[in-house]
Image: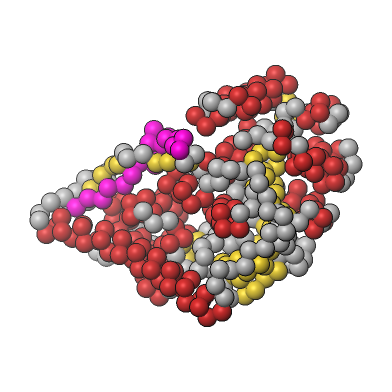
């Protein structure tokens, strides 16, 4: 994978012209989302006026309606849809909830404000006039409705002005403009830059970047080791974490930095089925949210560790072994059968090695050799030796 030495990526435009361009694109996208919501409402009204059963077509969000596109290398949603009808006793409430959430999102777009998924729940919750029935009993009902609306009108949650809690941090030689505030991510203190839920270009812009690559790690505890050792400074890179499986905001920002700044993405995760799955989500997209893959997946991301072969390769002690349980073994076999892993011999070899080992390892296992072995020896060795990368 090619890297750009000393790469600096200033914004293509500067000053007032850049702001006009970005905000113009932002308004255009918001208008499109607003129009999509209105089109949905008009279609429902038209069916009612024609004395038809008002219905909404919702693309099916399940494994059976997901496919791997070998050309784009994304997990993509298929064409299966389910109809949500007003005059169906079992669907009437969810039909009402869908239209109600859509109306609240349209209100947010109109006033150019955002709300959390929790706030959407409270905005839409009320007792239906003349009854004792509430529109929502708890947030577990409203969250899936937001996802249904996303796929129904082909607009992501961020475009509906809905956000989730922040999760993930980064540090390194990159300067961002976040809602008008210029932030140097090499000077953000011990916590680094907290990645927000909405990372679209009208919210976050890249002003300057001197990084050569991105190193994404699984957990904040590991990230803190890299941050404290100033790995990002000695290697001219951005170090990020997602607090486990990265949230949409982190995945979207990683994709934007990779795509717009041409930064390679290296992924450092635990040597277990969960680590493999997180890599799969970053690289190819999520099975449950396949409709977002085209803007969040990074097909060129590379897995650099921890590998099942590193126990012998790095002369590790038995103390780092964590025995595989039945659920680990079952999950590893499932992942091995994913179409994007099934045809890759190196990954089949990797998974079989873990199963034959009978144990898994955390990234922190490398610290058993010495506190900075991970940052000073292991990862530099992995980045240098491309033969150890897994695609």
Looking at this rendering, what residue extends furthest in the right direction? 370
- Looking at the image, is 1 positioned above or below residue 40? above
Q: Position of residue 364 (x, y in %)?
A: 78, 41
Say left or right for 367 vs 383: right
Please tell me which residue is depicted at 82% across the width and 55% down the height of the picture: 234
Query: Which corner quadrant of the image does residue 110 belong to?
Result: bottom left
Any part of residue 103 in sight: no
Tell me which residue sits at (80%, 44%) in the image.
380
- The quadrant of the image that shows the N terminus is top right
Q: Identify whether 103 is placed above or below 383.
A: below
Indicate how the structure is coloured in the image.
Answer: secondary structure
Q: Residue furthest left?
A: 50
Query: At 47% across and 46% down in the image, what residue appears?
Result: 293
Work out which residue is located at the far bottom of the displayed protein and give it: 16
Instruction: Locate the C terminus and report the quarter of the image it occupies.
Output: top right
Left or right of 38: which side holds 69?
Answer: right
* Residue 13 placement (x, y as % from top left): 54, 72
Question: Is residue 236 at all visible to an observer of this figure?
Answer: yes
Residue sitting nearer the eye, 270 or 302: 302
Q: Is residue 82 above or below residue 208?
A: above
Which residue appears at 36% of the width and 63% of the height?
33
As for residue 60 lying within the magenta part, the answer is yes
Residue 230 image position (x, y, % from top left): 81, 56
Q: Is 202 or 323 nearer to us in this picture? A: 202
Instruction: Give the left or right position of residue 248, taking residue 265 as reference.
Output: left
Q: Which residues are magenta?
A: 54-71
Query: Does residue 2 show up magenta in the picture?
Result: no
Q: Position of residue 365 (x, y in %)?
A: 80, 37
Residue 101 in the image: above or below residue 22: above
């Amino acid at each position: 994978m090619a890297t750009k030495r000393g790469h600096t990526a200033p914004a293509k435009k500067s000053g007032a012209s850049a702001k006009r361009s970005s905000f113009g694109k932002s308004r255009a996208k918001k208008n499109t989302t607003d129009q999509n919501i209105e089109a949905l409402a008009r279609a429902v009204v038209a069916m009612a006026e024609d004395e038809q059963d008002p219905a909404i077509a919702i693309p099916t969000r399940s494994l059976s309606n997901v496919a791997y596109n070998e050309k784009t290398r994304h997990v993509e949603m298929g064409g299966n849809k389910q109809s949500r009808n007003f005059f169906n006793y079992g669907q009437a409430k969810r039909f009402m909830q869908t239209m109600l959430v859509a109306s609240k999102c349209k209100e947010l777009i109109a006033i150019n404000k955002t709300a959390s998924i929790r706030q959407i729940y409270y905005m839409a919750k009320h007792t239906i006039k003349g009854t004792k029935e509430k529109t929502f009993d708890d947030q577990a009902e409203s969250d899936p409705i937001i996802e249904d609306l996303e796929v129904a009108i082909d607009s992501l949650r961020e475009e509906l002005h809905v956000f989730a809690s922040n999760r993930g941090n980064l540090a390194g030689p990159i300067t961002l403009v976040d809602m008008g505030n210029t932030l140097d991510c090499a000077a953000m203190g011990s916590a680094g830059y907290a990645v927000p839920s909405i990372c679209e270009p009208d919210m976050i812009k890249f002003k300057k970047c001197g990084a050569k690559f991105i190193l994404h790690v699984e957990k904040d505890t590991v990230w803190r080791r890299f941050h404290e050792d100033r790995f990002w400074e000695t290697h001219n890179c951005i170090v990020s974490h997602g607090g486990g499986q990265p949230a949409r905001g982190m995945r979207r920002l990683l994709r934007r930095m990779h795509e717009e700044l041409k930064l390679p993405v290296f992924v450092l995760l635990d040597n277990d089925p969960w680590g493999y799955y997180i890599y799969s989500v970053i690289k190819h997209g999520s099975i449950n949210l396949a409709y977002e893959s085209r803007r969040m997946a990074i097909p060129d991301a590379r897995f650099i560790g921890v590998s099942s072969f590193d126990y012998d390769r790095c002369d590790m002690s038995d103390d780092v072994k964590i025995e595989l349980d039945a659920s680990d073994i079952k999950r590893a076999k499932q992942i091995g059968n994913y179409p994007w892993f099934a045809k890759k011999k190196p990954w089949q070899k990797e998974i079989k090695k873990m199963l034959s080992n009978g144990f898994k390892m955390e990234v922190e296992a490398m610290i058993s050799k010495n506190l900075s072995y991970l940052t000073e020896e292991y990862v530099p060795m992995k980045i240098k030796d491309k033969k150890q990368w897994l695609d």
